[in-house]
Image (tube, helix red, strand yellow):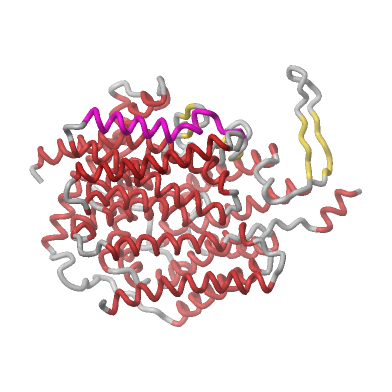
Amino acid sequence: MDRRLISVIVALVAVLIIFVLVSLIGGALNENLKLEAVGLLRFAFTGIGLVIVFIIYWLTRTSGAWDVGTREVVYMAIGAALYAVFSYLFNGTVFAVPSVSQVALRPAIAIPMFFGYTFGPTVGFFTGAVGNMFGDALTGFSLSPQWSVGNGLVGMIAGMVALFADKKKSMNTVLIISAVLAAIATIIYALNPALENMMFFDVDAGIFGDAQITLFAGLSVVIGFLLVLIVRFAFGKNVDVAAAVMWSMLGNLIGIGFAAISDIWVNGFSPAVAIVGEFLPAAGPNLIFAAILVPILVAAYAAAQQQTGR
Amino acid sequence: MLVTWRYRKRKSLIQGFDPRAWVIFYVCFLASSLLFWDLRFLTPLLIIALMAIFTSGITWRETYRTWLFIGGFITFFTVLTFLTGRGGMEHYAEEHTITSLSAPFEILGWRPTLDVTVERIVYAVSQLVRVFSVSSMTVLIPYTLNPEHYGITFRGLGLPDKIAYAMELTMRFIPTFARDFQLTMDAQRARGYEIEKLRGGLIAQVRKLAPLIVPVTIHAIAGSEDIIDAMDLRAFGVGPRMWLEQLHYRRRDYVLTGAAVLLFAASLAFSLLGYERLWIPDWALAWAGK
């Protein structure tokens, strides 16, 4: 291990230790301290997310997928800037974004998926994480760094297809993991169908999380999963399109899942609320974008590549 | 072609500091204000933000669109949470009613009633102060940070060369892509495309966003070849990078960095002592009790 690596590890471990210490000392100073709702935990989860990213990188570091050359630097910047601009434009204040049955649509999520899949996990992570950060800054909403890391994970995992030699075989692994994740989330919904939809912004009442989650939003992950499967088999011959939708789906499930689960501690949600109220209405619609916009982008990029010969 | 943010050289407090020191201060400020809902701690942060704005040398003429957008946005959300009283529910358990206004008419047997309560007013004010401080400090950044210094600033903050350069490019690309998006939308409108009138089912609506998103994305990627070539020709990433601009820390920058760290440490300590929650002044409760 070279020195630089050791210093990165030491820094990450130090951050974690500080958070553990702070939560212990904080509890001793103030007994009424309810740690579930402390703003500080946002930063702790950002640290945990970065540690996860680092572990994945460390385990697969010999693969060339993580290399960053001139091209990757520019693509990182393009991806992040596009993601920021699109999330600003489609956040609902600039245009009226289409929404169907309580499901607000965030078309911007297709950007980290596409950039991750096409240009590799490093580009994907930067696109998601930095793009979300700048997008939040443009909007003027308060920052949620754990959601930035979650968005980064979406792009990074979509890009991990580069770690597999055979794209076609990798899809089977992805299919099984995604099916299990989608099934778990939907079972939790089936057990708690009466919870509120935390992601739904009720324009008439002006707040988040006003209404009970609709059947459509509750089943959106299953619908998205089926849609992705249809695209995967309809484009079975075009391995690129099929792999892109499959990996985007996995990235979305894990990345949004990370952010939603961290809200169990950050916002003091119960696990069921985090999954049913946050994960399903955010991850489900994202899958619809994964199934529709990502293939269009992949196909358009392939055509552009052919034309320019790069 | 790149479009730039509206930076220009000004004699001002912010631009008198090293950009690295200012970015550290900004991050600490942001993190501190996110910890609190208590007005007693949000007010000093608001004062800092106001000081930064009024000493920034940015004129109303330059920024009035931005301020109007932010102002409208914040007021809209504050009024909505005030009227419905639902947004603050997670912050307070009971409400003390001051007065209850009810409309002199009925709509289908329902009489619109507005309960003015101490908690709602305090929550609305806290939210206003909190969001205004955070967003106004953010607005200042593109106006006061010299685009030539983006890269060296992030490098100086400890990021690796390539990541620092990627951050610089990101900040430079954002206004460019916003312009490209506008151009694409105008071009599609000329062809009869209307984003305001998306019809059809969910899948049809999503598909209809493609004529906006795909051209902007592919154009950005295709256009980047020139930038990649230019960087490769200058041997980007071959060795440790040298930056054209140099930044030097002076005493005032150390003071600002120290103040920033102190601000964050104090905020952290107070939030752990339990001062982060919504604070309802006793005198307001006493007043409502009358």
Give the image quarter of residue A177: top left
Query: Is residue A56 covered in magenta?
Result: no
At 78% from the left and 58% from the top, the residue drawn is B281
Q: Nearer the viewer, residue A52 or B289?
A: A52
In percent of width and height, residue A174 lies at: 30, 44
Which sits in the foreground, A97 or A255?
A255
Q: In the rendered structure, which segment of residues is drawn in magenta?
A: A211-235
Instruction: Note whether A263 is above or below A44 in the view shown.
Output: above
Q: Residue furthest left?
A: A309
Residue A60, relative to residue A268: is it above or below?
A: below
Residue A52 percent across, percent down from the top left: 38, 61
Q: Is residue A292 above or below residue B147?
A: above
- Where's residue A168, x and y in %? 20, 41
Q: A152 or B232: nearer the eye? A: A152
Q: Main secondary structure of the magenta part?
A: helix
* Residue sitting nearer the eye, B237 or A37: A37
* A58 displayed left or right of B74: left
Q: Residue furthest right?
A: B290
Question: For residue A39, what is the image quadrant?
Answer: bottom right
Q: Residue at horizontal 24%, vertical 71%?
A: B243
Q: Is residue A206 visible?
A: no
Residue A25 quadrant: bottom right
Tally the numbered discs: 0
Instruction: State whether residue A111 appears in this view.
Output: yes
Which residue does the image show at 48% across and 34% down from the upper left? A104
- Extreme residue in the top direction: B108
Q: Position of residue B269 (x, y in %)?
A: 62, 72
